[in-house]
Image: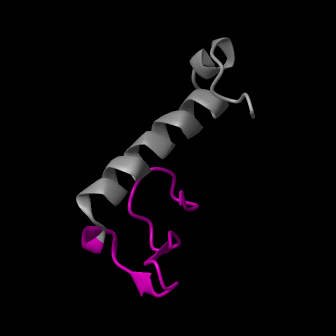
Amino acid sequence: MIGAGGFDTDASTAYLDQNGNAIKRKALSKQAKNTLHDYKLIQYDMTAGKGYLNDTNFFTVK
């Protein structure tokens, strides 16, 4: 999740494990960190970026 502090590790950002328990960002698995990075790139593209995803089928629901 992206907290009020944007892309940094603001204390308002909450990370949860598969059971819903709060964990620290550094406790995320490598896969979870990679997914979070991808999410941040997508969020940036949609809000402040050039909207590259709008020209793809990324938002197409099948």
Residue depicted at 64% across the width and 31% down the height:
46
Pick whichever, 42 or 4, lies toward us.
42
| Above-or-below relation of 36 to 45 | below
Whole-percent x and y of residue 25? 33, 69
Task: Say which quadrant the C terminus sits in.
Answer: top right
Residue extending farthest top: 55
Prevailing secondary structure class for the magenta stretch in the rendered image: loop
Whole-percent x and y of residue 20? 52, 84
Highlighted range, magenta: 1-27
Would residue 2 be visible to someone looking at this image? yes
Whole-percent x and y of residue 3? 55, 62
Magenta span includes 25: yes
Q: Quadrant of residue 47?
A: top right
Magenta span includes 41: no
Whole-percent x and y of residue 56? 63, 15
| Above-or-below relation of 40 to 28 | above
Residue extending farthest front: 62
| Above-or-below relation of 2 to 54 | below
Q: Is residue 52 left or right of residue 8?
A: right
Residue depicted at 33% across the width and 48% down the height:
34
Pick whichever, 61 or 42, lies toward us.
61
Pick whichever, 7 or 57, lies toward us.
57
